[in-house]
Image: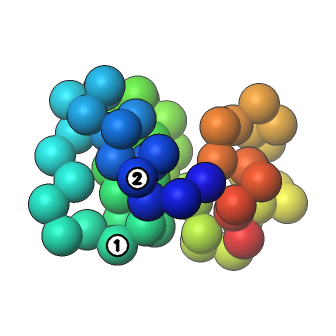
Amino acid sequence: MNMQEIKAIARERGVKAGTMKKAELVQAIQRSEGNDACFDTGRSATCGQAQCLWKDDCN
């Protein structure tokens, strides 16, 4: 997912993107949804969130 798409999702969820990098922004969105902010933390194989919107881009 590119940054424009992520920023659009952030706007929909009331998250201000500012100058955040991709991982920071996705984590902010995850927190706003009440989820574990695990994007790009190296836990993608063990996070247990198989339906996560960010799963394809995660490490």
Quick one: label 1 or label 2, which is nearer the N terminus?
Answer: 2
Q: State whether residue 49 is above or below residue 12.
A: below
Q: Is residue 29 above or below residue 26?
A: above
Determine which quarter of the picture holds residue 19: bottom left
- Residue tagged 1: 21
User: Which quadrant of the rendered structure holds the N terminus?
Assistant: bottom right
Foreground of the two, 4 or 59: 4
Do we see residue 55 in this rendering? yes
Q: Which residue is mark 2?
A: 4
**Numbered circles on residues, count:** 2
Q: Amino acid at mark 2?
A: Gln
Tag 1: residue type?
Answer: Lys
Q: Identify the residue shown where x is 40% and y is 35%.
A: 9
Q: Check the picture and name the quadrant holding the C terminus.
A: bottom right
Q: Nearer the viewer, residue 31 or 11?
A: 11
User: How many C-alpha atoms fall within 10 Å of the one at disc 1: few (<14), some, or many (≥20)?
Assistant: few
Q: Secondary structure at mark 1?
A: loop
**Residue drawn at the location 53% of the way across and 59% of the way down:** 2
Q: Please tell me whether mark 1 or mark 2 is closer to you in this view.
A: 2
Asked if residue 46 lies left or right of residue 13, the reply is right
As displayed, is residue 20 above or below residue 47?
below
Q: Position of residue 7 (x, y in %)?
A: 34, 47
User: What residue lies at 49% left-to-right and 35% top-to-bottom?
Assistant: 35
Compare residues 36 and 58 and report the one nearer the observer. Answer: 58
List x then y, in percent, for residue 54.
64, 47
CB within 8 Å, label 1 to label 2: no
Check disc 2: other Cα within 10 Å, few if <14, some if 14-19, many if 20+. few
**Cα–Cα span, label 1 and label 2:** 12 Å
